[in-house]
Image: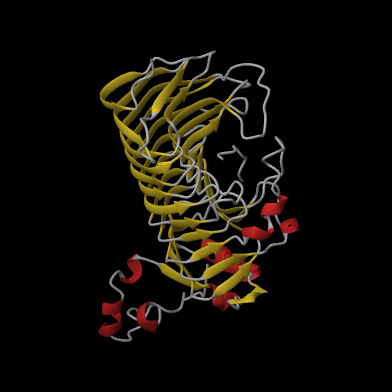
Amino acid sequence: MGLEIPFKLLLLFSSFSFAGVPAGAATAGLGSQYAQLLPYNNQRTSHFFNVKTFGAQADGLTDDTKAFLSAWNKACQATGEVDIMIPKGTYLVGPLKFAGPCENVSKIIVHMKGYLKATTNLFKYGDGAGWVEFRWIEGLTLTGGGTFDGQGAKAWPYNSCSTDFNCKLLPTNVKFLAMNRTIVRGITSVNSKFFHMALVECKNFKGSKIKISAPADSPNTDGIHIQRSSSVYFSRSLIGTGDDCISTGQGNSQVTITSISCGPGHGISVGSLGRYKDEGDVSGLVVRDCTMIGTSNGIRIKTWANSPGRSAATNMTFENINMENVTNPIIIDQAYCPFASCTPMGPSQVKLSDIYFKKIKGTSLSAVAVALECSKGIPCQDIYLEDVHLELATGEKQVTSTCKNVRAKYIGTQIPPPCA
């Protein structure tokens, strides 16, 4: 979907070090064997926190929200490196806002092995808020193989965004706001009420081995949404949702997406762009070595008609993408409308240029495998298609291309044939 939205762990082992050795043992004259267990001695301070020490029950019934927040607050006040432990178990939690800056902390590692379940009481969340939010933190690592379960099925009936331009936004599973040097690895997100994961104003973000899942008919359950962020890298992840597997919104630069398996869902999208005034430009996007399986779109660039302001999306490359029974493998839609009908007052004011589609192959469920519909007000410039080989899934006939307000440039194999 790619709606642009404003966005807004833990037993303290400070008295124990490795293997339960008392902190400061080496300096207390307790023996050289303890000093060997503390390789940095007093040169490095490391603190361990466990949510169960702060009262988390992990029974799936008791509200563990306060325990998580108390643990975070203690961790954020520590010095040096911090390890936050969420052991195996099922934790019922409401909205969690883990906020920095943690001024004296050099690194925070959240070892999430548990299964977190979101409260289904929508009155506890603000409009467009996240369920779990990380804000203004330097050097966060989130890992451990745990799961965020948004319990979205009870909230999806209240989603009116398919009919209401100004709909109330349901909670995102996990949001990252104004973060720097973040790593997310080996985490699962299921059945989010809205987006599964969202990045806003983040820098130097790396995500890998992420699993995201929601039913194909779940509304607006984008897998990963990226907005106003730079130096972002996602790789080796499995995403299947009811909306875009990954959507890159406005204001992004230097985003790389690689080795993603997408489906079901709406594919990997740029946008939607041009909905709001003063949107930032998009540049330096690379999507490569990805597979789309049974998705409604493959690679899609979507911008609203009648944009309230001008912006641009440029220098984007989509390379080595495999399409398996995809309805619209390659699509530029500059008259994007997610509603039943729209009456645009004017053309899109988003300029698209320097866009490369390379080594795109596979099967299309639609007779039109390549659809380039650019803005009449600002036609697309320097659109390149190189070695595109798409065939109709049924094998009955050759697929075709359509073009509007664009003179694409073609290199190498072209199936379907270029636009006339």
Residue sitting at x 33%, y 23%: 417
Specify the farthest residue to the bottom.
Answer: 30
Residue 310, picture quadrant: top right
Residue sitting at x 29%, y 78%: 37
Residue nearest the observer in this picture, 277 or 290: 290
Answer whether residue 165 is visible to the viewer in this image. Answer: yes
Q: How is colour applied across the structure in the image?
A: secondary structure
Residue sitting at x 38%, y 48%: 260
| Residue 86 on image: x %, y % | 50, 71
Residue 163's place in the image compared with 260, above or below, is above
Specify the farthest residue to the front.
Answer: 396
Residue 286, picture quadrant: top left
Residue 232's place in the image compared with 152, above or below, is above
Which quarter of the rendering shows the N terminus?
top right
In this image, 160 relative to 417: left or right? Answer: right
Residue 413, picture quadrant: top left
Answer whether residue 135 is visible to the viewer in this image. Answer: no
Residue sitting at x 60%, y 44%: 7
Residue 148's place in the image compared with 318, above or below, is below
Residue nearest the observer in this picture, 103 or 132: 132
| Residue 154 on image: x %, y % | 68, 60
Residue nearest the observer in this picture, 343 or 141: 343
Residue 20's place in the image compared with 192, above or below, is below
Which quarter of the rendering shows the C terminus?
top left
| Residue 418 on image: x %, y % | 35, 20
Exactly how many numbered labels are in the figure?
0
